[in-house]
Amino acid sequence: MPIEAYIYNHSNDGVTAAILFHQDSVRQLATPCAGPDQNLPPRTLSDYIAEADVATSKPESFFRPVDILWRHPTIVVPSRFATGRRMRITYSGNVRSGGGIAFEGYCVVEPGWFTTLLPLAQTQIEIEFLAGHGHDLIIVVG
């Protein structure tokens, strides 16, 4: 099942394109993204979400190594595959008075793709997420 994501002008700096996942999409990623993060001790994305939902301070970000396979039917990037990327799930707002914090995720794309993708910032795309051993695969499908 495809998951909603967006092309994102990361840090609004005009030179760094990323794939952005809003909170509802991050929740959908919790099932396919079952591997541990790069923190010590490691935790799963489900663990991060559970922690964020009751947090009284900003939790440590969740990091997972990923590759990206670009198979979008109309947005053509210079190469279809980017390796060695890192998906980060992190807080996106202040801690709520009753506990819990808003969060989102992003993954910076291959630098050679920036000039193609940055003009499309805020464009909705769809991804599929495949778990791997040690790192995962984000497939942009639509």
Image (cartoon, rainbow, N blue to C red):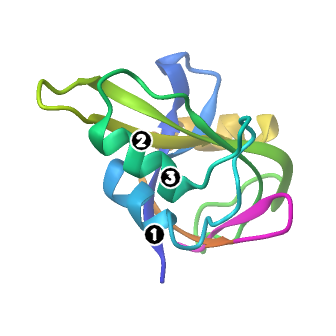
* Residue 141 placement, left or right of 139: left
Tag in front: 3 or 1: 3
112 vs 123: above or below: above
Q: Amino acid at mark 1?
A: Ile
**Residue visible at 39% across and 51% down in the picture:** 50
- Of residues 14 and 67, the one nearer the viewer is 67
Query: Which residue in the protein does label 2 denote?
Result: 104
Q: Distance from label 2 to label 1 (Cα)?
A: 14 Å
Circle 3/circle 1 CB separation < 8 Å? no
Counting residues from the N terminus, which is met first, the one under dot 3 or under dot 1? 1
Q: Position of residue 117 (x, y in %)?
A: 60, 43
Q: Position of residue 39 (x, y in %)?
A: 71, 36
- Of residues 68 and 46, the one nearer the viewer is 46
Mark 2, other Cα within 10 Å: few <14 / some 14–19 / many ≥20: some
Mark 3, other Cα within 10 Å: few <14 / some 14–19 / many ≥20: some
Q: Quadrant of residue 71?
A: bottom right
Q: Secondary structure under badge 3? A: helix
